Amino acid sequence: MVASTSVGAAFVQVMCAEDDRAHLVAFRLYEEGVLSGRGRYAAICGRTVLAAAMATAPGRRCPLCRASFDSRPPDLAARYQ
Ligand SMILES: [Zn+2]
């Protein structure tokens, strides 16, 4: 499942089919994953996420993604836009 997230427009939340967690993927990297057709996306926690089916219910948020997001430099979000 892929859904936009309330943490910022520059990231998308991607449910991982392997660990049932919602990871954050920079929108630019998400686009690259879509264009590649592989269904795998590089999350900000370092994990390569295998996207779950769209019908998958949202799961727990990945704590490492959340920590990475919270500790980013203030100007990082601007660079992703
Ligand atoms: Zn993560």
Image: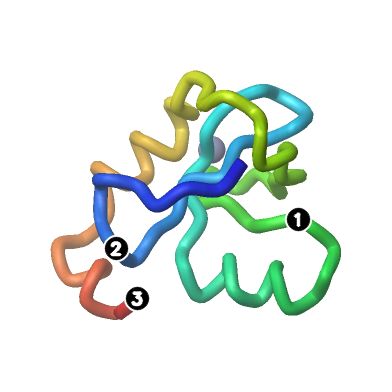
Residue displayed at 66% across by 76% down = 32
Q: What residue sits right under mark 3 in the picture?
A: 80
* Mark 1 surroundings: few (<14), some (14-19) or many (≥20) residues within 10 A: many
The amino acid pointed to by label 2 is Ala
Q: What residue sits right under mark 1 in the picture?
A: 40
Q: Evaluate if marks 3 and 2 touch, with contact meaning CB atoms under 8 Å apart.
A: no
Work out whether residue 73 or residue 43 is closer to the camera in this orientation and state it.
43
The amino acid pointed to by label 1 is Arg
Report the side of 46 relative to 72 (left or right): right
Mark toward the start of the polypeptide (1 vs 3): 1
**Circle 1 — which element?**
strand
Residue displayed at 34% across by 66% down = 10
Q: Tell me how far mark 3 sits from mark 2, CA to CA.
A: 9 Å
Image quarter where ligand 1 lies: top right
Examine the rendered structure and indicate whether residue 10 appears above or below residue 23: below
Residue 70: % across, % down: 25, 42
**Circle 2 — which element?**
loop
The amino acid pointed to by label 3 is Tyr
Q: Residue furthest left?
A: 74
Q: Evaluate if marks 1 and 2 touch, with contact meaning CB atoms under 8 Å apart.
A: no
Mark toward the start of the polypeptide (1 vs 2): 2
Mark toward the start of the polypeptide (3 vs 2): 2
Q: What residue sits right under mark 2 in the picture?
A: 9
Residue 80: % across, % down: 34, 76
Q: Tell me how far mark 1 sits from mark 3, CA to CA.
A: 19 Å
**Circle 3 — which element?**
loop
